[in-house]
Image (cartoon, rainbow, N blue to C red):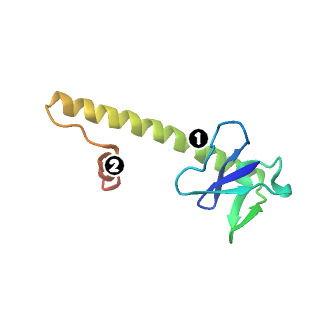
Amino acid sequence: MSLIFLGNDCITRRIPGSGVFSSAPPGSIMMEETPETVGVDIIRIKLVNDMITVLDYTPEQLQAIEDKSADDAILLKIGKVLFNHENRIRALEGKAPITVNQFKSAILNL
């Protein structure tokens, strides 16, 4: 099995023959799983100095990570809704739609 990292974070395991992530997503690194990482939650697997490392977290830290991940998922959905609404309003005003990158830039510049 392979681990796929984006930055220093493990984002998924690639199971050979599954068809999922047959190649690594752009900007990511694929590395072979080590015996220490087998069965470990990917939240705890990181790249430290280009070495696969399993971090020890307290239950409170793991809960905070999971809560942040859930919050990020909600924010992503809210962003998609706002993007669609912006383009619907622009269409009603007779304006050209904006791209995702234009929308992200506008949000970051608020």
> Is 88 situated above or below 39?
above
Q: Say what secondary structure mark 2 lies in.
A: helix
Classed neighbour count for the residue bearing mark 2: other residues with Cα under 10 Å, few (<14), some (14–19), many (≥20): few
The residues bearing labels 2 and 1 have C-alpha atoms spaced at a distance of 23 Å
Residue 22 image position (x, y, % from top left): 63, 43
The residue drawn where x is 61% and y is 48% is 23
Amino acid beneath label 1: Ala
Q: Residue furthest right?
A: 35
Residue 3 lies, in percent from the top left, at 71, 52
Q: Nearer the viewer, residue 29 or 55?
A: 29
Q: Alpha-carbon neighbours of circle 1 within 10 Å: few (<14), some, or many (≥20)?
A: few
Identify the residue at the far left of this view. Answer: 94
Residues at marks 2 and 1 touching, judged by CB atoms closer than 8 Å: no
Q: Earlier in the sequence, mark 2 or mark 1?
A: 1
Locate residue 45, reporting x and y percent. 73, 56
Q: Is residue 37 depicted above or below 67 in this figure?
A: below
Tell me what residue is drawn at x 63 percent, y 61 percent.
8
Q: Is residue 85 above or below residue 48?
A: above
In the displayed structure, does residue 17 sit left or right of residue 87? right
Q: Nearer the viewer, residue 17 or 46?
A: 17
| Residue with the mark numbered 1 | 70
Residue 51 figure quarter: bottom right
Q: Nearer the viewer, mark 2 or mark 1?
A: 2
- Is residue 105 found left or right of 25 in the rendered image? left
Looking at the image, which is closer to me, 34 or 67? 34
Q: Position of residue 104 (x, y in %)?
A: 35, 49
Q: Measuring 47% from the left and 41% from the top, which residue is drawn there?
A: 75
Secondary element type, mark 1: helix
* Residue type highlighted by circle 2: Asn
Label for residue 10? none
Tag of residue 101: 2
Q: Nearer the viewer, residue 101 or 86?
A: 101
